[in-house]
Image: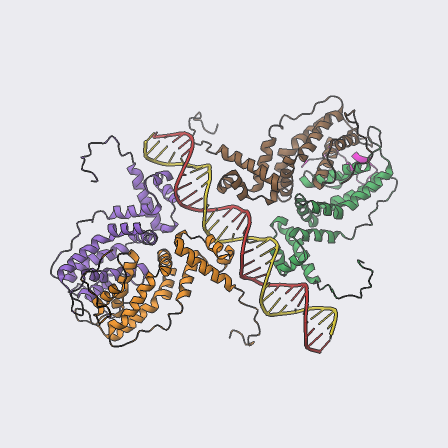
Chain colours: A green, B brown, C purple, D orange, E red, F yellow
Amino acid sequence: MFSGMSEQRTADVNRRSERARRAIHDATRELVGEQGFSKVTVEAIAARAGVGKQTIYRWWPSKCAIVLDVLITDNVSDHGSLTLPDSGDLAADVRPVLVGVATYFTDPANDKLLRAMTAEIQYDTDLAALVLDELLRPQFDAIVARIDSAGLTTPSGSPADPQIITEQLVGPIVHRWLLRRAPLDEDYINALVDHVVGASATKRPARRRRTSER
Amino acid sequence: MFSGMSEQRTADVNRRSERARRAIHDATRELVGEQGFSKVTVEAIAARAGVGKQTIYRWWPSKCAIVLDVLITDNVSDHGSLTLPDSGDLAADVRPVLVGVATYFTDPANDKLLRAMTAEIQYDTDLAALVLDELLRPQFDAIVARIDSAGLTTPSGSPADPQIITEQLVGPIVHRWLLRRAPLDEDYINALVDHVVGASATKRPARRRRTSER
Amino acid sequence: MFSGMSEQRTADVNRRSERARRAIHDATRELVGEQGFSKVTVEAIAARAGVGKQTIYRWWPSKCAIVLDVLITDNVSDHGSLTLPDSGDLAADVRPVLVGVATYFTDPANDKLLRAMTAEIQYDTDLAALVLDELLRPQFDAIVARIDSAGLTTPSGSPADPQIITEQLVGPIVHRWLLRRAPLDEDYINALVDHVVGASATKRPARRRRTSER
Amino acid sequence: MFSGMSEQRTADVNRRSERARRAIHDATRELVGEQGFSKVTVEAIAARAGVGKQTIYRWWPSKCAIVLDVLITDNVSDHGSLTLPDSGDLAADVRPVLVGVATYFTDPANDKLLRAMTAEIQYDTDLAALVLDELLRPQFDAIVARIDSAGLTTPSGSPADPQIITEQLVGPIVHRWLLRRAPLDEDYINALVDHVVGASATKRPARRRRTSER
DNA sequence: CGTTAAACGAGACGGTACGTCAAGTCTTTTC
DNA sequence: GAAAAGACTTGACGTACCGTCTCGTTTAACG
């Protein structure tokens, strides 16, 4: 895929051990889940994986590169193909993606890994760009595209910026997750969608007036 | 108050050195500004402040407690008294607070300190609550209160939840800051306010259709 | 005692607190006895004595000066007046002093204090001289004097050096004590005296051939 | 020997760096010589040796274990094979060993190391036993053996205890060294031997009556 | 089907910073 | 004005990990 040459040259064989790669991924997932990223050491990952420290440093530049690799590998199935349907009902079309995002962030398997990356990108701008592109942009852009086609207007009547509308949907979710302000359940997503693009019939019509806070 | 002995006993004097406290705050602000939180060591703070390491550990449990202390101390002047005016023009009332928030986050003096705390609260839930209460809630609650009194409705006509409306305003700002997706300038704030509560006349009428992204 | 002036001048009153001096002495004796000199801290002495740290530093330059002070104070009764009797029986005259020395070194109340000084004088020559003069020389010189008057001869017939004879008596005791090679009981002292200056009748005539070692 | 597998398994390689071991020994010898044991820090040894602190702690439990190791390593050539000749002249046979001991203690290269150990064994009985066994016992036992075969008697005529006779020879040397009472030169050793086992012809017939003190 | 070079496990290495401890000094208040 | 209390600066402690660097030992393509 990276070359048109029909794999004749195998001189620079990839001798890399798949067993080791897998063991390191698994050890990382486990340890970060158990103790949190910042308490996990490269030595601990190596020990848990039954692997030499050098084997880790040979293939990853840092602890957080491993975590990012795990996240991306686990996520790779979705990529590229993400497009929202256009059923005519914007709320109904958008809602599942947002529920998906909320679920993804909340899933205990991902939560700690994502928080680790969130912490790291505060200090590493390149990493921030990478995380953004690999993990968040596909969904974000798909929503932007669907909203663009809906031709919304702002409360004052001018044409709405789909980018900003999307931020109104995604921002609050990230905000709640980041600060652990309040639950990210389906009711909340429904209410949020209703506030931004208007409600469509949902299975469980939410009865609310105020969302509970923290 | 703790004793009936009308304050005769002053034995439990506060022997703490104000000079040391100040020097540590200043050294922390400077060093975090120069090198970023994660590269700053407690030893370096002590050295820069001309203070013994033990004096730091006597009063703060960790590097990040110092940073939080600096942030709160620097911020303490503002909050408590924070109430939004009600001029009848919601957008006009809300806009300055949001600009203030955006400015606060963007100010280089605060940015690195805040990112440090953002990283830390990923691992420390108690700290997260503290940061939320001390640094963010006053502004957030003030906005909620002002919006509550405006009696907005959702696009589908039901009464809006002021909490969620506020999240639509604050969430995107935090989101942009967190991921460094795009600038947090006044134009953006204006557009955002327009999308959420409708525009009122602004000094520099924004000319836009799409906000630029990253 | 340090001045001939009959205590008339009391204007520069000795404001030093006798209570504190005593308490520090006692605390030092106790703590060194309990934990050994090297584990005792000045802070611990101050705390146990119910005294401020500065009060200690005001009157003693170091931890080991306190210990030496305690040893000398406890020992001060003997000084100066020590002369051995001359009963004609050299062994009988010398034996009690050596038993006294051995007992003094072995007494648990003194042992740890003396070992502390022994450790310190390895690094502090002045201290070594002081310890020697204050604690050991009186007995040593008294023995030298008694032996001098006995007019011993060496095995090869020349007149013996009383200094060296005394070292043959004291040296082995110090050696055993220093290296904890073997017990310093009365049997041993008797045997030692017998080997150096010949036996006289003792209460318990020792039956031995070899002393047990360590 | 531990396995029947004729040494096929060499997995438990000795990975220890000889370079580091040597550098640490040398640095310790130098620093203790320059500044005295108690002023030398483990950090200083590590720095001088160009070695990480952990490398020291990996192999030695404490500063004084290094010093002991240096002393034993430097000394290891001598002992084991140590037996005194029996020329018939006891004084002549014993004298060289005692001169050797005195020289060893006095040699500036050893003096500070030995004083450091002397200080430490006051607090550590196990260490005392080790020092005794590794550094002093070989010579001591060799002298005991030689004296045993000589069949001496005490001044009062009973058979002498070779152990005690040896203590009469070694004790005064240690005593003088410990308290720095007087020089440990060859004249003194000759006189001492003369007093204990009688003189034999020596190269420089000592002219003395009293040894000078301190 | 052996040769050979890479990747591997193990873990010691030179370092940096940690958080603790005690030393000796300085400051404030009490008696 | 000495004493108690205790905060201060200093500096070494012993530990934990870092990322690099040998060591033998697999292991799999090549010859």
Q: Position of residue D29 (x, y in %)?
A: 42, 59
| Left or right, residue A198 beside residue B146 | right
Q: Nearer the viewer, residue A58 or B136?
A: A58
**Which residue is found at the position 31% from the left and 59% from the top?**
C178
Q: Nearer the viewer, residue B39 or B75?
A: B39
Q: Does the magenta stretch include residue D152?
A: no
Residue stretch in magenta: A191-214
Q: Nearer the viewer, residue D187 or B35?
A: D187
Q: Position of residue C206 (x, y in %)?
A: 21, 67
**Which residue is found at the position 24% from the left and 64% from the top?**
D187
Q: Residue furthest left?
A: C88
**Which residue is found at the position 70% from the left and 33% from the top?**
B102
Quadrant for the C terminus of chain B, please.
top right
Q: Does the magenta stretch include residue A201?
A: yes
Say whether residue A36 is visible.
no
Q: Residue furthest top?
A: B87
Q: Which of D120 and D192 is in front in this view?
A: D192
Q: Is residue A105 above or below residue A156?
A: below
Say whether residue D203 is visible.
yes
| Left or right, residue B24 beside residue A7 | left
Q: In this view, does C153 lie above or below C114?
A: below
Q: Position of residue B45 (x, y in %)?
A: 54, 41
Q: Position of residue D116 (x, y in %)?
A: 37, 56
Quadrant of res C103: bottom left
Quadrant of res C147: bottom left
Query: Could you tell me what secondary structure mostly forms the magenta stretch?
Result: loop
**Which residue is found at the position 71% from the left and 47% from the top?**
A107
Q: Which residue lies furthest to the right in this view?
A: A88
